[in-house]
Every structure is written in C-alpha cells, then in structure tokens.
Amino acid sequence: MQSIVVTGTSTGIGWGTAKVLLDRGFRVFGSVRKQVDADRLQKEFGSNFVPLLFDITDEAKVLSAARFVREALKGATLRGLVNNAGIAVSGPALELSIDDYRRQMEVNVIGQIVVTQAFAPLLGADRSLRGAPGRIAMISSVSGKNGNPLLSPYCTSKHAIEGFSDSIRREFMLFGIDVIVIGPGAVKMPIWAKAGEVDISAYRNSPFFPALQRIRDYMLKLGESALPAEKIGELVYQALTSPRPRVRYSISPEPVQLLIGRMLPTRMLDRIVAKRLGLLPRSGS
C-alpha cells in the first residue's frame, strides 16, 4: 500500500484530501495539532489513517514525525506529501502588528519549508530508499496569484509559496521529485460559517472599518457557494497520480470571475475591487 503525508487534516482541505486519498486506497499519515482530533479522525477514517501529532512550526516534532513515517515505510519511498496546513491573518496593512505578519509567515511559509525539508528524503532525496520518487502538492490559493485588500498577510504568504514551489520543483528534478501547486478558491470550512462572529470592533475608528464590514458580509455569502473540500482532494489526487501533471491547478466556485480577473488590466481590476469595498478616495479629497 502506498503512503501519503497530508498536513492539517482536522478540517477543510486537509480533511477532504485525506478522505479522497483513503477512498482511493492509499494509507494517509495526517497531521493534527490536538490529540482529540487525532482520536476523532482515527475513528472516522479507520486503520489506514495514521495520525501524526505536530504543529508545522515545531521543527523538532516535525522531524520526529518524519522518523516515525520512515520506520513505517520500511525502506520504501513516500508516494506524496501534501503541504496544506495554514492560517489566514486579515486586517488593514497599516494597522496590523508586525507580530501578526510574522505569525502568518511563520505558519504559511516557514512551516511549509520545515515540513518539506523533513519529508523530502522519504520522497526520494534519500536515494537509499527503494521505489519511485514521490511528489509534493503545495496548497496555495487564488490569492497566490492575486492580492486582495485587507488580506495582505495571507496573500503575501501564498505568493511566497508559489515562488518556493517553482524553485524547489526545479531543484528537486535532480531526484525525480515533482512539485505541483493547487490554487483553490473558497472551500467549505468552519471559518466561513463563523465569519459573522469575527470581532472587528478594534477597527471601529479606522478608515477601513466600512470595508472590513463589507468583507465580512462577502465572506458569509461566499461560504454558501464555496467548494466542497473533497473537490480539492480530487484535484490533489490527480496531481499526485497523473502521468503528466500540470505544474499548477486552479479551481474556484466562481470560474467566470476568476477568468475575468486574469483578463482585465491590473489598474482596472484595482478600481473594481476598491469600488466594491468602498476604498476609492472620496471626491475632492
């Protein structure tokens, strides 16, 4: 049985990916941060799901998990690594703290590097292992190719992931390890249902407060049309098993809007987005 490591499997894309891969006959080593989630998923998914307990920013625990997986593989290569775990920090760029930015980058960028370095030997960088080289699926976002106002930390982190992925894909050709980027739009996750509960009162006196209110309302509506997490899982499966995978896959609940965004001149898109959020300067100012 071939094995794949998926980070951040407690909910959302990680959960949907684990489910699809398990249904397709793979053994999945899935990372979670809490024992209660490990127990829940073990019961839900069965014996072919093996929980790994670590936070991706804790290098020592990630390396320990990689050693555990190496022992379980018994000298064979890992079929795939899905770098999914991450967070989203939002707010006005001028009013977020530097620590907010550091936390975003530590999880969404440094954490992915930690995991990649730990598991790349099992994918074939360690040539003493038997079996074909594996692949890495990097979960980026539509925000990896676009910058959204009031989400600059998250968008910055996803742009970084896109660059990191291109770089290591070319480096890892030495070992036959491929790197594929998955750039989904909105996916059904608990975060959308809780958007209305997000406290933005700290920004009540900010000039960005009206725009933050509009963003929150938009997130609530987006949650209603968001993609099922299993849809992303199917795309990950394709990326990890296709004889000739693309270097990047995009999927969105609003494909027409995504296409329009790619076709419009950047300045025009700037004005459309700013107008929708009330970010255009007032007349006469």
Image (cartoon, helix red, strand yellow):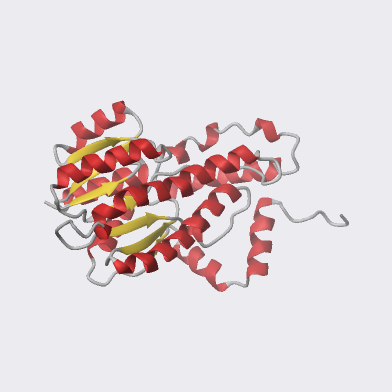
The quadrant in which residue 135 appears is bottom left
Q: Position of residue 19 (x, y in %)?
A: 23, 46
Which is more toward the observer, 179 or 15? 179
Q: Is residue 251 visible?
A: yes
- Identify which residue is drawn at 36% across, 33% down: 33
Q: Residue placed farthest to the top in the image? A: 36
The quadrant in which residue 9 appears is top left
Q: Is residue 248 visible?
A: no
Total count of labels: 0
Task: Please indicate whether residue 169 sits to the left or right of residue 124 in the image.
Answer: right
Instruction: Relative to 38, say whether 91 is above or below.
Output: below
Which is more toward the observer, 140 or 102? 102
Which is more toward the observer, 147 or 161? 161
Q: Position of residue 40 (x, y in %)?
A: 25, 30
Q: Quadrant of the C terminus?
A: bottom right
Task: Please indicate whether residue 39 sits to the left or right of residue 255 in the image.
Answer: left
Task: Please indicate whether residue 141 sits to the left or right of residue 196 in the image.
Answer: left
Task: Please indicate whether residue 97 sits to the left or right of residue 140 in the image.
Answer: right
Q: Position of residue 163 (x, y in %)?
A: 48, 62
- Identify which residue is drawn at 54% across, 35% down: 196
Q: Position of residue 61 (x, y in %)?
A: 34, 36
- Identify which residue is drawn at 19% across, 38% down: 45
- Identify which residue is drawn at 38% across, 69% down: 170
Q: Residue placed farthest to the right in the image? A: 284
